[in-house]
Amino acid sequence: MKNMVKLLLPLLLVQLQAIAQTDFWQLVGGTESIHEIIDVAFHPNGSIFLASDLGGMYRSTDGGVTWSAIDEGLTTPYMRCLLVDTHGHIFLGTDSRIFKSTDNGDHWVDVNLSTGYWVNSIVSGGDNTLFAEFGYGIY
């Protein structure tokens, strides 16, 4: 039985890979000039946001066909992670800080949490609570 599984598993994986590449995924375009996309987030209003390492923040309002840089108020090009909360507020983790936008990414405000470490993840705990992981701890 083990030998049968070892024999059939690669065939199954090849078939699944072929399906994933042809039937489910489609390049929507517009991201060729954006440097190393790190994270993506979707806003309830339909906007899509991209965080790019060394490239800044980008927004698409047409399903990803075109992208616009949105960096007013950001003080670093090193983007690491994104979160859109239930109120539509956007949180951006960078190389050492967290920024917030309440106007669909048009303006960014530093939330005064300087970590000295990369902000690797931001998650919502509900009830206006956020958790951020950077460096050596969760805050």
Image (tube, rainbow, N blue to C red):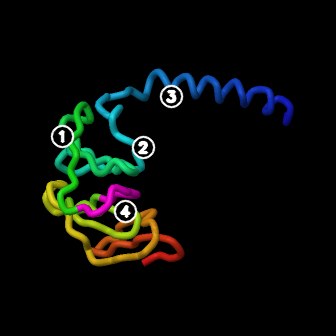
At mark 1, the secondary structure is loop
Q: Amino acid at mark 1?
A: Thr
* Label 2 environment density (alpha carbons within 10 Å; few <14, some 14–19, many ≥20): some
- Residue found 32% across the figure and 71% down from its top: 126
Q: Give the vertical position of 54 relative to 68 (above or below).
A: below
Distance between the alpha carbons at the discs numbered 1 and 2: 20 Å
- Mark 4 or mark 3, earlier in chain: 3
- Which residue, given by chain and number where applicable, does mark 3 sit on? 20
Cα separation, mark 4 vs mark 3, equals 32 Å
Residue type, numbered disc 2: Glu
On the rendered image, what quadrant is the N terminus found in?
Answer: top right
N-term-proximal mark, 3 vs 2: 3
Q: Nearer the viewer, mark 3 or mark 2?
A: 2
Q: Position of residue 77 (x, y in %)?
A: 33, 55
Mark 2, residue position: 36
Name which residue lies at 53% across and 75% down.
136
> Residue 21 appears at what percent x and percent y?
50, 25
Instruction: Give the quarter of the image for residue 80.
Output: bottom left
Q: Gap between marks 1 and 4, in whole Å? A: 23 Å
For badge 3, the amino acid type reads Ala
Residue matched to label 4: 94
Q: Are marks 1 and 4 in contact (CB under 8 Å)?
A: no
Where residue 61 is drawn, which disc sits there? Answer: 1
Give neighbour class at mark 4: few <14, some 14-19, many 20+ (Cα, 10 Å): many
